[in-house]
Image (cartoon, rainbow, N blue to C red):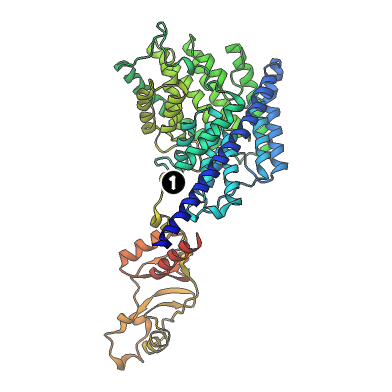
Amino acid sequence: MELMRSALRTGHGRFTRVLALSVLTGIITGAVVAVFELAVSEVLLAELENLSLWQLALAPGIGLALASAVLHFGAPGSSAATSDEYVRCFHDRHPRLPLRVFPVKMLAGALTIGSGGAVGLEGPAIYAGSTIGLTLQERLHRFFRREETKLLLTAGAAAGVAAVFKTPATGVIFALEAPYRDDVTRRALLPALLASAAGYISYVVIIGTDPVVPFIGRARFDGGGGGLFEFNLADIGGALLLGVVAGLAARGFAWLVRRAKTAESVSLPLRVALGAVVLAGLTVASDAFFEEPLSLGPGYRAMEWVVGDHAIGLIALLFGIRLSATVVTLAAGGVGGVFIPLATLGVILGQFVSEVLGSEKPTLYPTLGLAAFLGAGYRAPLTAVMFVAESTGGGVFVVPALIAAAVSQLVTGPNSVSSYQRTERMGHLEARFALPLSSALTTDVFTVPPDATVSEFMFTHVLGRREVVVPVVDGSAYRGMVGLEDVAELDRAAWDTTLMEDVMRTDLPSAVPSWTLRDAVAEMDRGDVDQLAVTDGHDVFIGIVRVDDILKLDDILDQTGG
């Protein structure tokens, strides 16, 4: 009993230290994100506003070129991914985010966004939190059990979102929801809560608490005298319609973003050059139509502009320009996130639907569009709805936002802007069965030729090596299997004259190396056998996979953390 109490005290103390490290992760992340945002928003983007139109047109291309050069020379081989790196690491068996790459990628993000690239600050913020959390966990791994290897990674991502958007609950939900399309991870809930709260506090102490989305402060009020917003059945119908439209649009946008992230068939210098030209054209066009370059930056100014009285054609044009600017920035190697670009496109789309329906509630549909488009694009509906609830300072839009987000999820299907999201969590056995067949393959196998006699099989293999089933191989060609039960009914006098090819079984299933363990187990079950011969697909024998070896593998992986 005393031993058990000691173990419980040790476990409690360990988890307390983990929670303390989560708070530390949040504090550091919040401070880093605050400094990063000050550098980008108060220095680079503020300076951008003072430039002439032709300088504004050139700025995004220059920023992309500098960001690409920084990544190429500062972190050779490193990708431009930021928030995707969190999702990738979450699913990796041995996650790594090298600390030496961290300042390089943050600088590249600052150059991309600060020069007018149409991506968001949340990408570098999530990357910063993930790197800080994972680095702390690697340095202090003795405080964590094997199954807790990604706690601070998740906590750091939560802190990054909480800080950059000033929405601590959104940060928690995003970190738990982003790794999966149709699932959440709950193991890191408490560390994520503490890190998110600490990151938020650390950030607002430096930056302040002004809302991120410019129109969101008045979103609780309608346009009829400032009274509190109340929705009706017509608004529910509008939310359903907006969910369908947002789902379809997000589906196309997610496809374009994934293609942009993997546009490797064109060399990077050419992509940067083409991107610079296109972004320059979009800058000039947006200035001509909207009297300000709304194609530049994360999209806050575009959101502020669109929530007003504008022609429906201009709203549709702004949607196309912003979508194009984001996709081109990513395709040209820009470093940044798509959370705020998704929110921006959602606000524009919501305003478009509002104009079509003739709504007299100026902030309703832009807010619902934000929830629907953001939730569908990231496959994170809870994150989107919580972002709306926290940003508006109340729950008045939660019900219609839930409806719009749910419908958009159904319409968009499995599509997502993230390249590394998985559909759902796999259980213990499912994860094991997803391993390749080679993980349980035995290649050092004794075989018997087809012209060997039953006597040779019995004395050499059954009695000598205790093998009751042996592959029959002619040179390198697999011919079949022979087992003790295949010769059990044979008269002893016939052992010396009966050959393996006369008694071997050729109807048993075989496997190929590309299979998973799940495929092999399913085939064994169908064939009612406990081992399979493995060939290269052209009857060349490679080895054997046995049920016993799969069970041993499970024990080995449990003991080694594999």
The quadrant of the picture occupied by the N terminus is: bottom left
Q: Is residue 357 above or below residue 543?
A: above
Task: Tell which residue pokes out farthest to the left in this image.
Answer: 489
Q: Which sits in the foreground, 414 or 100?
A: 100
Q: Is residue 29 above or below residue 165?
A: below
Mark 1 burial class by Cα count in 10 Å: few <14, some 14-19, many 20+ = some
In the visual, does 57 lie left or right of 442? right
Q: Percent position (x, y) of residue 227? A: 39, 9
Instruction: Identify residue for label 1.
Output: 187
Disc 1 marks a residue whose amino acid type is Arg
In the visual, does 244 lie left or right of 557? left
| Quadrant of residue 198 within the rendered picture | top right
SS under mark 1: loop
Tell me what residue is drawn at x 38 percent, y 85 percent: 462
Q: Is residue 430 above or below residue 275?
A: below
Task: Tell which residue pokes out farthest to the bottom in this image.
Answer: 493
| Quadrant of residue 243 within the rendered picture | top left
Tell me what residue is drawn at x 38 percent, y 20 percent: 396
Query: From this viewpoint, is residue 82 visible?
Result: no
Q: Which sits in the foreground, 494 or 76?
A: 76
Q: Percent position (x, y) of residue 120? A: 57, 29
Tell me what residue is drawn at x 42 percent, y 25 percent: 389
Q: Which sits in the foreground, 65 or 211?
A: 211
Task: Tell which residue pokes out farthest to the top in this image.
Answer: 225
Query: From this viewpoint, is residue 351 visible?
Result: yes
Q: Percent position (x, y) of residue 266? A: 63, 39
Q: Percent position (x, y) of residue 39? A: 67, 27
Number of marks: 1
